[in-house]
Amino acid sequence: MTPEQQQAIQTHVEAISAILYADCESESLKTLEDIELAGKERVLTHVTPQIGIFLSTQLAGQK
């Protein structure tokens, strides 16, 4: 991965993190465990399916 690609990932991860954080009730994020669980839940619910769709579309386009 190039440094430019790594920077792009970092930029997008920060933007996604801000969106997911805004979706959380801040009073429910009192411990590192709370933060980790909330983050994992939101990534699995919102981010991972979209990555799967993107990769499936890319694969289908190659065939």
Image: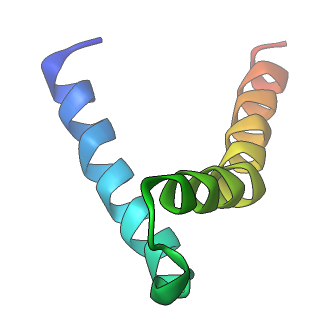
Quadrant of the rendering where the C terminus is positioned: top right
Q: Residue at x 45, y 73 (%)?
A: 30
Viewed as shown, does residue 55 lie left or right of 25?
A: right
Vertical side of 38 occupied by 3: above or below: above
What percent of the width, then of the height, locates residue 19? Answer: 45, 74
The one of 10 and 29 positioned closer to us in this rendering: 29
Q: Residue at x 45, y 63 (%)?
A: 31
Q: Is residue 25 above or below residue 54?
A: below
Displayed quadrant of residue 52: top right
* Residue 39 found in image quarter: bottom right
Image coordinates for residue 44, horizontal then vertical, percent:
73, 49
Q: State the quadrant of the N terminus.
A: top left
> Does residue 11 appear left or right of residue 36 in this picture?
left
Q: Position of residue 43 (x, y in %)?
A: 63, 52
Q: Residue at x 26, y 27 (%)?
A: 5
Q: Judge left or right: residue 43 versus residue 59.
A: left
